Image: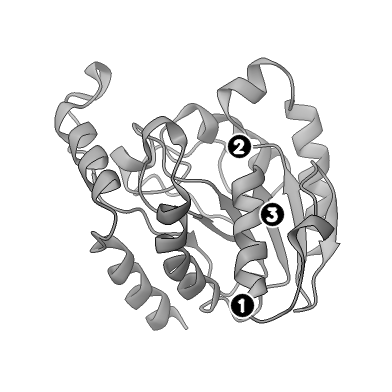
Amino acid sequence: MVQNIHKVRSEVIKCVECPRLVSFRTKIAQEKRKSYMDWDYWGKPVPGYGDPNSNLLILGLAPAAHGGNRTGRVFTGDKSADFLFKCLHAAGMANQADSTSRDDGLTLAGFMSVAVKCVPPGDKPTAQERNNCAKHLASEIECLPNLKIVLGLGKIGFESFLHFSRKSFDIKMKDYPFKHGVGYNLPNGIALYGAYHPSPRNVNTKTITFDMMVKFLKKLKNEI
């Protein structure tokens, strides 16, 4: 299974299927942010990472422009990652409270990925781009033999797993509305939970708070 996930990772990294995303991720990697001028930006699709033998998948939207697109690891080196890993660490699901680079020593009690592997302009992938990338996410999911729980961070992360499940089961999206902290038992035996995305907007407006997220993650940990 580990060998399979390495093969999938290689396939993800070399993908050039979406011209708009290829152009955008490359432009960002070349221009860089002033505070990261000394970084050699990743600038490629960003595969999932973590323990493929885990029974938990944490699924977000896409890499951040100066986070995953810079560091080469999802939820790494950006504001969303700062908040998320403080919460994961407090809940006992990560060995450290920050996620800054691919070689920072982070270990995660789960596998973490994103629905769209390249950073999209305005964090808004098109429907076609999401469809193009669905096969890569499906390949990753198929390398997780013990999967029991999926945590969708934000509506797109949440719905991307529903779309994956619809390939095997006749389910209606409207029967599984996205709500923070709410879970559903799917016909494939997977429990799918939704959580507000740990974006700066949601954190700054207190749509989601540290205490709220940690409480939810601890509840989830008890079900793993």
Residue assigned mark 2: 84
Residue in the picture at 73% in, 71% down: 148
Q: Nearer the viewer, residue 92 or 154?
A: 154
Instruction: Please identify the quadrant where the C terminus is shown.
Output: bottom right
Residue in the picture at 39% in, 49% down: 73
Q: Position of residue 31 (x, y in %)?
A: 16, 27
Q: Secondary structure at mark 3?
A: strand
Q: Is residue 166 above or below residue 45?
A: below
The image quadrant of residue 59 is bottom right
Q: Which mark is residue 167?
A: 1
The image quadrant of residue 203 is top right
Residue assigned mark 3: 151
Residue in the picture at 48% in, 71% down: 140
Q: Position of residue 125 (x, y in %)?
A: 44, 44
Category of crowding for the residue at label 3, using alpha-carbon neighbours closer than 10 angstroms: few (below 14), some (14–19), many (at least 20) = many
Viewer-side label of 1, 3: 1
